[in-house]
Amino acid sequence: MLLRKEEEYRFELHHTFKGEYLSPIIMNLNDKFIHHYDDYDEVYHCNQKIHQLSALPKVTLDFHVLYKHEQCIGIALISHGQLNSEILLDQKGLIENPSQSIILNYFHICEKGHGLGTKWLKEIIFPYYQDFDKNTMYLKSSHAKAFPFYLRLGQKIGAYKTKSDNGLFVREGQIFKINF
């Protein structure tokens, strides 16, 4: 479903998965391997998350996809429904009102620094969910460069540490709550 089109960008929402939606994560993973390597394979983990969420009863998985011309350059993987923070965020009791909340499971855009992330969330994704009486988004991230972005939108409500895939690096993450 087309949510908005402007200039060369299309913001779409889909309820079924297509492999091309992983393109932005693959491009970011390539950049990570070149510039600041750790052994965390985000493509694998995103696939695992999609399968995990798809198997949960009463949880809906939405694929928000950003295209520039015909190329997929962004994905926002969002879950909503009967949200359990212990299962979905690995911590108990974080989600205050599950029926009015969404979880941003993955958020990747290939074109960084153009304001697309802010625009996508504030002008397209948040209003879409507000129409369904949602007003809070939760997310966890281990991308330290993204922390300031999420703090501008909301607040930090937790922290965690996890090992990278081969146990070679410690990934320090933060959990955020964003009211919209």
Image (cartoon, grey):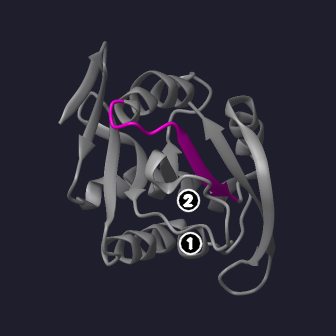
Q: Find out whether residue 139 is within the magenta segment.
A: yes
Can see residue 102?
yes
Q: Residues within 10 Å of mark 1 (few under 14, many from 20)?
A: some
Taking the image as drawn, is residue 105 in sight? no
Give the residue type at disc 2.
Leu
| Residue at disc 1, secondary structure | loop
Please tell me whether residue 128 is drawn above or below residue 25 in the rendered image: above
On the image, numbered disc 2 is attached to which residue?
29
- Is 157 above or below relative to 128? below
The secondary element bearing badge 2 is classed as helix
In contact (CB < 8 Å): disc 2 and disc 1: yes
Q: Give the residue number, with chain letter if any, for mark 1.
A: 41
Image coordinates of residue 23 in percent, x first then y, are 38, 53
> Which amino acid does the dot numbered 1 rest on?
Asp
- Residue drawn 69% across the image and 39% down it: 150
Instruction: Return the disc, 2 or 1, that comes first in the chain's sequence.
Output: 2
Q: Tell me the distance, in whole angstroms, between the alpha carbons under discs 2 and 1.
A: 7 Å
Q: Position of residue 68 (x, y in %)?
A: 33, 29
Q: Quadrant of residue 56?
A: bottom left
The magenta segment: 131-141
Residue visible at 49% across and 40% down in the picture: 110
Q: Is residue 41 left or right of residue 166?
A: left
* Residue at point 51%, 36% (across, down): 135
Quarter of the figure that contains the C terminus: top right
**Quarter of the image with the N terminus in it:** top left
Against 180, residue 159 (above or below) is below
Q: Is residue 70 left or right of residue 161?
A: left
Q: Residue furthest top?
A: 7
Q: Position of residue 143 (x, y in %)?
A: 71, 53
Which of these two is toward me, 173 or 30?
Answer: 173
Who is closer to the viewer here, 176 or 68? 176
